[in-house]
Image (tube, grey):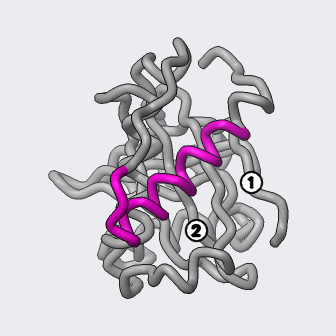
Amino acid sequence: MTPFTDTEGAQLLRLARHSIHAHITGIAPDPLPDLDYLKIPAASFVTLTQHKQLRGCIGSLQAWRTLGEDVSQNAIAAATRDPRFPSLLAAELPLTRIEVSLLSVAEPLSFRDEADLLAQLRPHTDGLILYHGQQQATFLPQVWHQIPEPADFLAHLKMKAGLAPDHQTASLRFARYSVQKWLEAPH
């Protein structure tokens, strides 16, 4: 993933906030800015927090639309379609802090057993995707701040996927990715 500048990151944060505002207030959104970097295929996640607590997080694990479209649509989805939370109200938007994460291409991990997998994980660097049949779950690298131990990180990811924390790791597939992220300043 080619690194993006802080100026581009700030533009992505503004795009995410504008997309949410337009959607929840029912106004017509502005067209996407005509910037080359917004036209490249990219995968992003948009995370919303209020008072340092998660308020919504939705994203794409693979690049399947342009960066501008991906950030805009994931921002709206994080605000209105995260099944863990009710839809964001317009009155809540000023209290909401937005983070945009751009994902690298996921790299499949080969491992002999759970200990081998855990030894390969890079805390605070790796995002991890768990695949179980048609199901998948992921934790962004930012989750390491809440779950710093690799074994706990893996157990919680299994639970997020609807599996027991001691589910046999050998029956699962994993991939890792890194992110470049930008977070709005506190309001």
The residue labelled by disc 1 is: 183
Residue farthest along the front direction in this orientation: 27
- Please tell me whether residue 143 is drawn above or below residue 114 in the rendered image: below
Q: Which quadrant, please, contains the N terminus?
A: top right
- Please tell me whether residue 106 is drawn above or below residue 141 in the rendered image: above
Label 2 sits on what residue type? Leu
Residue 136 placement (x, y as % from top left)? 30, 55
Q: Quadrant of residue 178?
A: top right
Residue 16 placement (x, y as % from top left)? 53, 51
Pointer 2 and pointer 1: residues touching (CB < 8 Å)? Answer: no
Label 1 sits on what residue type? Leu
Q: Give the camera-side residue of 136 and 186.
A: 186
Q: Main secondary structure of the magenta part?
A: helix
Is residue 123 visible from the viewing direction of this image? no
Residue drawn 73% across the image and 66% down it: 149
- Say whether residue 121 is left or right of residue 43: right
Give SS at disc 2: strand
- Say whether residue 35 is left or right of residue 76: right
Give SS at disc 1: strand
Q: Give the camera-side residue of 100 and 10.
A: 10
* Residue 7 covered by magenta stretch: no
Query: Looking at the rendered structure, which numbered label has been put on residue 48?
Result: 2
The region drawn magenta spans 10-28
Residue drawn 65% across the image and 45% down it: 121
Which badge, 2 or 1, is on the more N-terminal residue?
2
Q: Give the camera-side residue of 34 and 121.
A: 34
Q: Which quadrant, please, contains the C terminus?
A: bottom right
* Residue 11 covered by magenta stretch: yes
- Say whether residue 2 is left or right of residue 130: right
- Please tell me whether residue 146 is drawn above or below residue 67 in the rendered image: below
Give the Cα distance between marks 2 and 1.
10 Å
Residue farthest along the right direction in this orientation: 186
